[in-house]
Image (tube, helix red, strand yellow):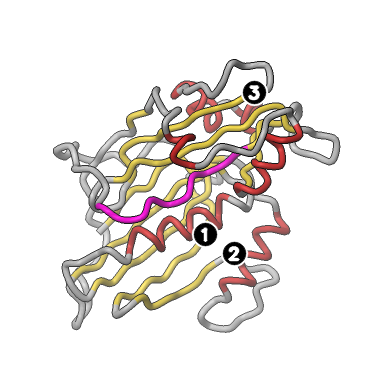
Amino acid sequence: MPPTAGRRRAASGPPRLGPRPRLDYYLILDRPAGPDAVAEAIVVEEFVRATDWTTVGLRSAGWTPAGAGWWSSAAYSRAMRADPELRARVLPVARAEADAAHRRLGGAALPDEPVLRAGFHDDQVLPVTAPLRLGPSAPDGYHERRVYRALFAGDPLAHRLAELATRWRPADGRSTADALPAGRRRVDDDRFAWTVRRVGRGLAWSLDLTVLLTGADDRTVGPLLHELTSAVRLCGLVPMTTERFD
C-alpha cells in the first residue's frame, strides 16, 4: 500500500545518537504458515529513521543453509510485503526463535547484531513526504502534537492480537475480548495514546500513535514507537513504513 501522498521535503538527517533498537527477525517458511511449515531461510531487517522518527529507508540481510553467507536484497524485502505468495510464508519472530532456526538449519549461534548489520548492502529507499496536517494544534500545556501511522502488510494471528489487546488494556477498562489493541502511556511529561486498526478498505493494518510533547525534545518518541511497532509485528504482521500526520 503506497505511503500517503504529500509534498517531498528535503532529505532528513540521520537518526539521532543513542542505543540502536533491536533488529527485526523473520523466518521464511517452506509453505504458508501452519503446523507442518518449516523454516528454510532467515531474514533480518532494520528501518532507517529520519530525525522526526519517520522511516526513510529499509536495510536487510538474508541467510539460507545452501548459501555462502548472508546476502542483501532490497527487492526481496519489497517482495516480502507486496507478493502475497511470499508474504504467506513470512513469519515474524523474536531473535531467540531466529537463533533456534539458524541452529536447526545447520548454522552456529546467530551472529551478534553488529555483525548482522555489516551484511546490509542493498538498502531500499522509502518515499519521504511532508507531514500531512490533519488535526488541531497541541492543547494548552503542550508544546507540540504529532500523529504517527505505522503501516503493516499481511494478516495478524487472531490469538496474538487478542493477547496484545489484553496486555495493553484500553484506558476505559472495557473488556478486550472483541477489542483491537489500544493503550496509553506517559513517559516523563509526554503523553502517548495508540490503537491498532484495519485501514485502506481492509488491505492493510496500522498502528496509530498520538503524541503530546511538553517541549521541543522528542527523544521519548523513538523508543516507544519502536516498542509498539515490534509488538504489532510479533502478531504476524510485516511493517512497511511509518508516516507522520500533524
Please state, as top left, top right, bottom left or bottom right, where the C terminus lies in the image: bottom left
Q: What residue type is disc 2 on?
A: Leu
In the visual, does 15 lie left or right of 173? Answer: left
Q: Residues within 10 Å of mark 2 (few under 14, many from 20)?
A: some
Query: Nearer the observer, disc 2 or disc 3?
Result: 3
Where is residue 72 shown, x and y percent of the image?
A: 47, 23
Q: Specify the label residue 64 is tagged with.
A: 3
Q: Marks 2 and 1, how far apart in space?
A: 6 Å
In the visual, does 26 lie left or right of 77? Answer: right
Reply yes or no: does residue 84 show up in magenta.
no
Which quadrant of the structure image shows residue 222?
bottom left
Tell me which residue sits at (61%, 81%) in the image: 174
Do the numbered discs 2 and 1 sit on residues whose CB atoms are within 8 Å?
Answer: yes
Q: Marks 3 and 1, how far apart in space?
A: 33 Å
Secondary structure beneath label 1: strand
Which quadrant of the structure image shows residue 194?
bottom left
Q: Report the residue that reaches farthest toward the left.
A: 10
In the visual, does 146 lie left or right of 206? Answer: left
Q: What residue type is disc 1 on?
A: Val
Tell me which residue sits at (67%, 65%) in the image: 163
Tell me which residue sits at (57%, 65%) in the image: 181
Query: Disc 2 marks which residue?
Result: 180
> Mark 3 or 1 closer to N-term?
3
Q: Specify the label residue 196 is tagged with.
A: 1
**Magenta extent:** 17-26
> Mark 2 or 1 closer to N-term?
2
Secondary structure beneath label 2: loop
Q: What residue type is disc 3 on?
A: Thr
Please state, as top left, top right, bottom left or bottom right, where the N terminus lies in the image: top left
> Mark 2 or 3 closer to N-term?
3
